[in-house]
Amino acid sequence: MTRTDLILATSILLFGAFCIGFLTHWLVNRLSHVSKSDLDELDRMAAALHHAEESRDTALGRRRKAEDELERTRSDLDAAVGALTEARQDAEELRAFISEQNMGTR
């Protein structure tokens, strides 16, 4: 093998390695490339997710307010029932007292 043949063989091998590297780079770029429409879709999905999270947070806030209002209403109801029970007992005592007074005067 002469010096020219060695240079030619080395040149062909290096060119082949360059071509394989270039094709590999192009293929990897092509397969991993994200298109503009994919990015737009991701942006729309992110916006929809953000909107859904805001809606959820708003709904949770309304639910907490409704639960607080319900708890206050229950407390008011319990107080009213207690007051009504006391008023009934007082009314019964007054009826009994009036009945005793009426029985005693006859």
Image (cartoon, rainbow, N blue to C red):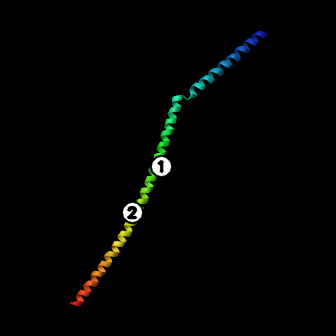
Q: Quadrant of the N terminus?
A: top right
Question: Dot 2, how many residues are within 10 Å of its Cα: few (below 14), some (14-19), or many (20+)?
Answer: few
Rendered image: mark on residue 25: none
Question: Dot 1, how many residues are within 10 Å of its Cα: few (below 14), some (14-19), or many (20+)?
Answer: few
Any part of residue 1 in sight: no
Which percent across, then down, holds residue 29? 60, 26
Q: What kind of residue is marked 1?
A: Asp
Q: Quadrant of the C terminus?
A: bottom left
For disc 2, the marked residue is 73
Outermost residue on the left side: it is 106
Q: Residue at x 64, y 21 (%)?
A: 22
Q: Residue at x 43, y 53 (%)?
A: 62
Point out the tag, 2 or 1, that comes first from the N-terminus. 1
Above or below, comparing residue 64 to residue 10 in the picture: below
Outermost residue on the right side: it is 3
Which percent across, then down, holds residue 66? 41, 56
Q: Residue at x 58, y 28 (%)?
A: 32
Which percent across, then down, holds residue 13? 70, 16
For disc 1, the marked residue is 57
Above or below, comparing residue 52 to residue 14 in the picture: below
Q: What kind of residue is marked 2?
A: Thr
Which percent across, then down, holds residue 70? 40, 60
Is residue 60 toward the left or the right of residue 12 in the image? left
Q: Quadrant of residue 97?
A: bottom left
Along the line of sight, the residue nearer the viewer: 19 or 69: 69
